[in-house]
Image (cartoon, helix red, strand yellow):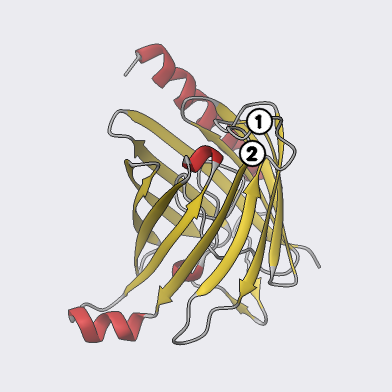
Amino acid sequence: MNPHRLYRTTRAVLVSAVGLSQCATAGAQVQDGSRVRPAAEARLPGLESMTGLLRAPSAYVPGRREVTLLASGSHRTMAGALLGFDERGEIGINSGGENGGGTGLNAKINLVPETLLLPAVSAGVLNAFGTSGANRSGYLVVSKYVIPYFVEALTGKRNLAVKLHAGYGGGLYRNQPFVGAEVWSGNGVAALGEVVAGRVNVGARYSHRGYGVTLGLLEGKRLGGSVSCTVTLQ
């Protein structure tokens, strides 16, 4: 990897982390109803201004009135924001990023809510007003949260939770299916893996009381990362 590019990416992520620390007081809590949402249930952005893994989206959306500010860096740096509404959708805006650069508007609608046995199903678009198909990326995605006692029954391991994702998209996703998985531990750390446009990306994520840090190795050769801060509007 180009040392200069690595330096720029690292600097952008660290500088953004300082700025994001001002978006909420220390120990900010993301409320889901009357409780703090466990880290395994966190709905965080990856390297784009959408809820998902690294580059793949998930079918999940932020909670009602949740606002997330984020900054990321990989091939290009990006700053963005997400707003959740009515537990059924999200709207995001970003400046920069890999999906065409410039300013983009993203949206996702949850078509089918997740239940104990059935997955969540959502449709979304990145860079909705992009001038070309390469910049505009529509997708359909299915996600299932395998709750901890199911994982324990299958693996014998406690304090683990698994989220599985699969979908199909154009633009950034090159009219191909994508798949991904998240394995969460009890201390807020998750392992991420995905296949997007035929390329494998792996990474890790840490979440604590509204703050999130995501790091990844893209296509086996490029580092990327993001930092985010989520608060609930009263």
Residue in the image at 54% along x and 64% along y: 59
Residue 226 spot, x, y in % from top left: 51, 40
**Amino acid bearing label 2:** Arg
Q: In x, y percent, where is residue 41?
A: 49, 70
Q: Residue at x 44, y 73 (%)?
A: 144
Look at the image and tell me in which quarter the C terminus lies: bottom right
**Where does residue 174 sit, x and y in percent of width and height?**
47, 39
- Label 1 close to label 2 by CB (< 8 Å): yes
* Residue at far right of view: 234
Tell me the number on the disc at residue 53.
none
For the N terminus, the quadrant is top left
Residue denoted by label 1:
132
70 up-or-down from 75: above or below: below
Position of residue 122 measured from the top left corner of the image (x, y, whole percent): 59, 65
Q: Label 1, label 2: how many angstroms apart (C-alpha)?
A: 6 Å
Which residue shows up at 28% across the image and 79% down it? 151
Q: Amino acid at mark 1?
A: Ser
Q: How many marks?
A: 2
Label 1 Cα crowd, 10 Å radius (few <14 / some 14-19 / many 20+):
few
Foreground: 96 or 33? 96
* Residue 116 horizontal side relative to residue 132, left or right: left
Under tag 2, what secondary structure? loop
Decide: few, some or many residues near mark 2? Use Cα within 10 Å; few <14, some 14-19, many ≥20: many
Residue beneath disc 2: 136
